[in-house]
Amino acid sequence: MTDFPIIVFAKPPVAGVAKTRLIPALGETGAAQLHARLLEQTIKTAVKASQTVYLFTAMEHEHEAFIDLQNRYAITLLPQVDGDLGARMQDAFARVGPALLIGTDCPNIDAALLVRCALALQHHDAVFVSAEDGGYALIGLHQPFDELFAGIPWSSAQVMPETVERLHKLQLRWLEVAQLWDVDTPDDYERLCVHFPDLCK
């Protein structure tokens, strides 16, 4: 365990809002229930890795699921600001300082990997766990860099390639610690049920 801060970004597990790309396969309620399980799994993993965990909430900041997690895991809740993902991440790093930031879509991220990333950040300006779909599942920064997030085509296969171009342009020392898959599509859900059957109740 480390005391290096971990930021988790999450929407509330609301039917019709959470995991929308899985609604055709699971229905609105089923997709929201899956999101709730992934959210709790992510928080469990984060608190195993760090004594300092921030859950940055979106939309319904006082949703009962967020309050329940705060009470059970002694985490800090903070609201995400308005804006695209880049603006929200920029704000989170500005408020917390050096940290790792993750979402809730990658159950392959375990506590050991989080600790590895925190240790790697001691010798790099930025660390990443990239995603197979072209994005990334984790970013760690010592400080926010405006040009790193501005104008990125979020939710596309160009997120990580474009970010790498920015890293080179800014002459930052960075490390890709691992590449993993995340859970966005029905095919991803089938993969999840093979590797993490407890999350597919």
Image: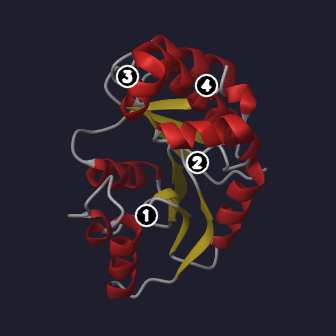
Give the structural element (helix, strand or loop) at label 2: strand
Give the structural element (helix, strand or loop) at label 4: helix
Sequence order check, earlier mark of 3 and 4: 4
Identify the residue under disc 3.
Answer: 61
Q: In the visual, does 107 lie left or right of 159?
A: right
Residue type beneath disc 1: Gly
Q: In the visual, does 147 lie left or right of 160?
A: left
Question: Which mark's residue is nearer the viewer, 3 or 4?
Answer: 4
Residue type beneath disc 4: Arg
Sequence order check, earlier mark of 2 and 1: 2
Give residue 160's position: percent from left, percent from top. 41, 68
Identify the residue under disc 2.
Answer: 6
Sequence order check, earlier mark of 2 and 4: 2
Sequence order check, earlier mark of 1 and 4: 4
Mark seen at residue 37 = 4
Give residue 84's position: percent from left, percent from top. 24, 48
The scheme the figure's colours follow is secondary structure
Q: Residues within 10 Å of mark 1 (few under 14, many from 20)?
A: some
Question: Which mark's residue is nearer the viewer, 2 or 4?
Answer: 4
Report the front residue among 17 and 66. 17
Q: In the rendered image, is residue 104 in sight?
A: no
